[in-house]
Image (tube, grey):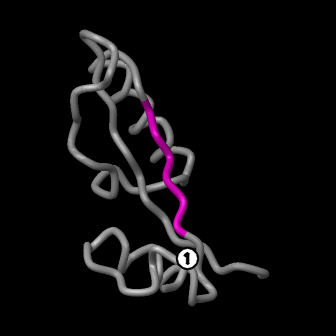
Amino acid sequence: MSDCFLESPNTPVEREVLALQNSDRERLRVLIIGSRDGVIETIHDLHRRGFAEVGLWSPLLPAPSSGEVMSILTRDRRVGG
């Protein structure tokens, strides 16, 4: 039996990790956590600066800290260039 738990991926997450490990791409995530207004304002500010389109961010999600929300931006980048 192999020690690699990803040898036979069973879940979507395991398949995604395996695909990224075998590609020339790296998945990056940017996370903003704070008040609802603060997160929205920051997403719009980053858009104005040319960082990312507003629609690429996840919907507002409850954050681990009570009363806060978060939004996640996922990007892929080419490894080594």
The quadrant of the image that shows the C terminus is bottom right
64 relative position to 51: left or right = left
Name the foreground residue: 20 vs 43. 20
Direction right: furthest residue: 80
Name the foreground residue: 79 vs 35. 79
42 relative position to 56: left or right = right
Image position of 29 with respect to 71: above or below:
below
- Tag 1 residue: 3
Direction top: furthest residue: 67
- 43 in magenta: no
Image position of 78 with respect to 45: above or below:
below
20 relative position to 12: left or right = right
Q: Give the total of numbered labels.
A: 1
Q: Residues within 10 Å of mark 1 (few under 14, many from 20)?
A: few
Q: Residue at x 30, y 25 (%)?
A: 63
Q: Quadrant of residue 62?
A: top left
Image position of 27 with respect to 39: above or below:
below
Q: Position of residue 43 (x, y in %)?
A: 40, 38
Q: Position of residue 30 (x, y in %)?
A: 50, 46
Magenta extent? 27-32
Q: Quadrant of residue 8?
A: bottom left
